[in-house]
Image: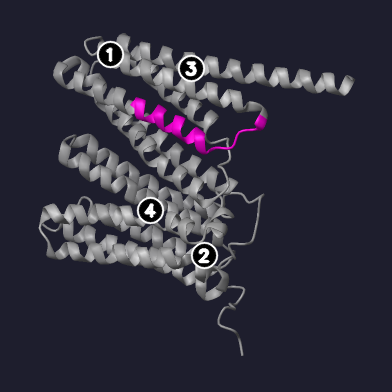
């Protein structure tokens, strides 16, 4: 008689999470899976662009972490348990369909919008709960570790069901409470099974996936610049200068982020990994709102002085949050022992850059857009130049020490 935890080869039982594959590359299925999240992020970002008010911002503050949570669970599942076979492909397909359905409901009839969104969220919540629970059918060792996920995700499901029976004010509180609960399981596992939790770390392939998700957001920022320019009828030479400065700022932010964060491994342990994943949320949300600012910068600078000053303030705050996010992430990343001094210098440079951006924003709200963008770009380029100088100086000194040690 076939045991319950066995499965046909064509079906493909989930890979055991204890299986190590240090050379694993991101699969085509994972890249295809990411495409639906490109659409989801694009939709909520463009919705905020068209309705930039407090109510829509609160909605954005909910949906962005929710979409990131869905993407993160699917990505971690594939990283830990993805296998060659029909089951992994079907699990990916179903989640893609759910996220696509969520995107559709965001623009549904206003009278039924909340109901439609809630139904899809309940399906998504229940499906992701099943996703983690079902691994225990095939892998007994996983059963003792997936309980925090199963129990807490079901509690979140119950909270979301209860939104049908309360007023709008309490509905939002329950939705945000359920969202916070969804990020709790790794911390609960760390508290309950500390020894097991310390052995679970963010893989290099998962770090690459986080980098790919970040690229999605950078793409939205570039779209913001392009849309902002496309909305103008008279494309004068100064506007093209603003365009060049804007794209250069985005490129500089990409340079800083991927140099300092995405090429580094996270410290070992599920606690460090989970905190790093959560830090991506405010960092990338700030980056996305920078894209929204670019979308409206060019026209507001010409036609609406008050709105332009508001955008400058929002842009500066979000740029500061983005740099602060990178600074905080550096505490969770592994650096070689010989570069500990460089890490401290990196934090100092990022902090000085952050303060410089805040100073320029507060004192330069009455500046022309070109002047403001040029000053911000100068700050970012100086940061890049100093960071590169410090790093290559460190590498040169290390190389000299190694050569002298070999010669002696």
**Number of residues whose C-alpha sits closer than 10 Å to that of mark 2, classed few (under 14), some (14–19) or many (20 or more):** many
Calculate the distance from the C-alpha at mark 1 to the C-alpha at mark 4. 39 Å
Q: Element type at marker 4?
A: loop
Tell me which residue sits at (42%, 48%) in the image.
35
Task: Determine if the magenta segment contains residue 243.
Answer: no
Residue beneath disc 3: 383
C-alpha distance separating marks 2 and 4: 23 Å
Q: Is residue 328 magenta?
A: yes
Q: Quadrant of the N terminus?
A: bottom right
**Left or right of 397 in this view: 55:** left
Give the SS element for disc 3. helix
Mark 4 closeness class: few <14, some 14–19, many ≥20 residues within 10 Å: many
Q: Is disc 3 surrounded by few (<14), some (14 to 19) or many (20+) residues within 10 Å?
A: some
Which is more toward the observer, 309 or 102?
309
Q: Which residues are magenta?
A: 319-337
Q: What's the CA distance linking mark 3 and mark 4?
A: 33 Å
Residue at label 1?
A: 369
Query: Residue 60: x percent and y percent?
Result: 25, 43
The answer to which quarter of the image holds residue 380 is top left
Residue receiving disc 2:
88
Question: Above or below — where is 121 with respect to 307?
Answer: below
Q: CA distance from mark 2 to mark 1?
A: 50 Å
* Mark closer to the chain start, 2 or 4: 2
Location of residue 76 in the rendering, given as x and y in whole percent from the top left corner:
49, 55
- Label 3 or label 1, whichever comes before in sequence order: 1
- Is label 1 or label 4 in front? 4
Above or below for 239 versus 154 = above
């Amino acid at each position: 008689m076939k045991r319950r935890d066995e499965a046909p080869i064509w079906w493909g039982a989930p890979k055991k999470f204890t299986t190590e594959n240090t050379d694993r590359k991101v699969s085509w299925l994972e890249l295809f899976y990411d495409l639906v999240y490109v659409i989801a992020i694009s939709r909520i970002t463009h919705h905020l662009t068209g309705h930039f008010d407090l109510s829509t911002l609160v909605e954005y503050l909910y949906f962005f972490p929710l979409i990131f949570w869905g993407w993160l669970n699917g990505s971690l599942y594939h990283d830990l348990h993805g296998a060659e076979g029909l089951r992994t492909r079907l699990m990916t397909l179903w989640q893609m369909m759910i996220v696509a359905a969520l995107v559709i409901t965001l623009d549904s009839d206003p009278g039924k919008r909340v109901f439609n969104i809630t139904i899809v969220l309940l399906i998504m919540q229940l499906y992701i709960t099943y996703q983690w629970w079902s691994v225990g059918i095939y892998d007994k060792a996983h059963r003792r570790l997936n309980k925090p996920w199963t129990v807490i995700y079901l509690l979140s499901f119950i909270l979301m069901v209860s939104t049908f029976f309360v007023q709008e004010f309490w509905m939002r509180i329950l939705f945000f409470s359920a969202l916070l609960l969804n990020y709790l399981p790794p911390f609960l596992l760390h508290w309950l099974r500390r020894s097991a939790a310390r052995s679970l770390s963010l893989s290099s392939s998962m770090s690459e996936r986080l980098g790919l998700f970040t690229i999605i957001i950078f793409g939205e920022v570039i779209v913001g610049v392009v849309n902002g320019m496309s909305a103008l009828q008279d494309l004068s030479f100064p506007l093209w200068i603003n365009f060049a400065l804007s794209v250069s700022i985005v490129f500089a932010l990409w340079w800083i982020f991927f140099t300092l964060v995405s090429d580094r491994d996270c410290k070992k342990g599920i606690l460090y990994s989970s905190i790093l994943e959560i830090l991506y949320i405010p960092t990338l949300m700030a980056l996305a709102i920078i894209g929204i600012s670019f979308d409206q910068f060019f026209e507001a600078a010409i036609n609406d002085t008050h709105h332009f000053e508001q955008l400058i303030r929002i842009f500066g705050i979000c740029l500061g949050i983005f740099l602060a996010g990178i600074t905080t992430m550096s505490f969770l990343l592994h650096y070689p022992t010989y570069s500990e001094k460089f890490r401290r210098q990196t934090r100092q440079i990022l902090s000085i850059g952050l303060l410089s951006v805040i100073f320029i924003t507060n004192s330069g709200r009455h500046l022309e857009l070109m002047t403001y963008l040029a000053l911000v770009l100068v700050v970012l380029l100086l940061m890049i130049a100093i960071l590169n100088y410090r790093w290559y100086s460190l590498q040169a000194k290390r190389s000299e020490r190694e050569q002298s040690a070999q010669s002696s």
